[in-house]
Amino acid sequence: METNELVILSRKYLNGTASDGEKNALLQWYNAYSEEELTAILTVAPHEDEASLEARMLQRLHAVTGTGTTTRIHTMRRTITKVAAAAVIIGAMAGAWLLWKNSRTATPAIAKVQTGTNAVLVLDDGTEVQLDSSQHGVVSQQGNTVVSKSASTLSYQQQNNKETAVRYNTLKTPRGGQFRLVLPDGTSVWLNAASSITYPTAFTGKERKVSITGEAYFEVAASAEHTFTVTANNTDILVLGTRFNVNAYEEEKFTSTTLVQGAVLVRGKTQAQHLLPGQQALVTATDLQLVKQADVSAAIAWKNGFFSFKDADVPAVMRELARWYNVDIIYSGGIPDGSFTGEMSRTLTLPQVAELMRTTRIHMSITNGGKSITVTPE
């Protein structure tokens, strides 16, 4: 396999566009290494610069693939460190790469890949409808609105514009669940794990209002005559038509709104801020902070099937794992110091994640019959 082909296929794998044949080709390349060789590739020698690391990677690639090409390896992100640059290439085959940083060392970790979705729809009268991946067809008819389900998407369709009664539904995802909702106006909403959205079954006036808990990504259908408002904790987000992410988990320090496209007005209790694409608002009960250059890809990584961390401490990482894998976190011997940077596929099983963490100097064991994770320092 030519080196430039390897890089292209690695990127396609991470983007989820690789074919089965391409995945097999990457897997064959990956399996050609022993664990010792992988460790050697991903370990930076003392005083080694980026050019030397790249040359060493190429030399090993040539030996395995039987090619003498001198094509340069271009990393996916210019800002990542030398160690992570190597880990991205190998991690593409593994489905995950993490860089653990503490006062002593920086260690990359890899893991090979192999997870689901359920939700609950609460109707206006309190009836609960269990939604699973096998359901298809009409779920409910409420007034002039038909509610139907296909795969992991719930859709609302108004039969006409004569609806007068206002009915509210709530869609809830459990830990480990994820769901897409299409509102009556065509707005799409993706709900992350342990989240909910409350909304009218038909939009009857000039305002479109919904409220969420947890995390959701919105693609709001444009309408100059009908404003769209999202309420989350102590935050209101006002839009006309745009794409943005809202993280409003109660256990997080901020309610964060990250703008992908368009424009929004974020309003806290005491302040308001217009956002431009690529910006983020962090709101607390007493404050609103503007991040002018936010990591948008990291904010919406969950929607694309990844965990994404940038200098995230251990509790922040474990909160995300707890929500997705439906486990409780127990710390034994104190909370380890340090931070994580990197990406990890949400299709990894919990044992695979535990193995990945162990290679980053964090010992994570599955306890209580799979209901909890016990974290201990090295």
Image (cartoon, rainbow, N blue to C red):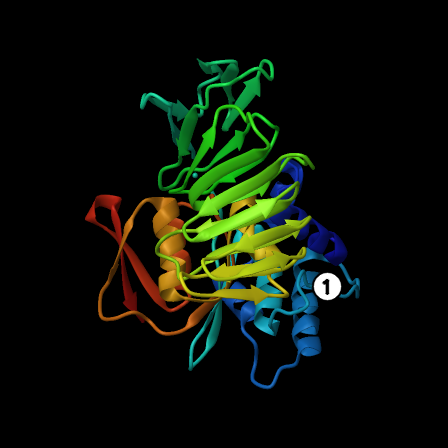
Answer above or below: position of 264 versus 363.
above
- 45 sits left or right of 136 in the view: right
**Picture coordinates of residue 274 (x, y %)?**
62, 57
Q: Nearer the viewer, residue 134 or 284?
A: 284
* Local crowd size for mark 1, using a 10 Å CA cut-off: few (<14), some (14–19), many (≥20): few
Answer above or below: position of 51 versus 229.
below
Under circle 1, the secondary element is loop
**Picture coordinates of residue 333 (x, y %)?**
22, 70
**Picture coordinates of residue 48 (x, y %)?**
62, 82
Q: Quadrant of the C terminus?
A: bottom left
Q: Nearer the viewer, residue 344 or 69?
A: 344
- Residue lying at the far left in this picture: please name it: 368
**Residue 31 shows in this picture:** no
Residue at x-position 55% and y-position 34%: 208
Q: Nearer the viewer, residue 52 or 353?
A: 353
Answer above or below: position of 111 versus 176.
below
Q: Nearer the viewer, residue 127 or 99?
A: 127
Answer above or below: position of 89 versus 134.
below
Quarter of the rendering containing residue 20:
top right
**Picture coordinates of residue 365 (x, y %)?**
28, 56
Tell me the amino acid under the disc marked 1.
Answer: His
**Residue 310 shows in this picture:** yes
The residue that label 1 is drawn on is 74
Quarter of the rendering containing residue 89:
bottom right
- 377 sits left or right of 101 in the view: left
Total labels: the figure holds 1
Residue at x-position 36% and y-position 58%: 318
- Residue lying at the far bottom in this picture: please name it: 47
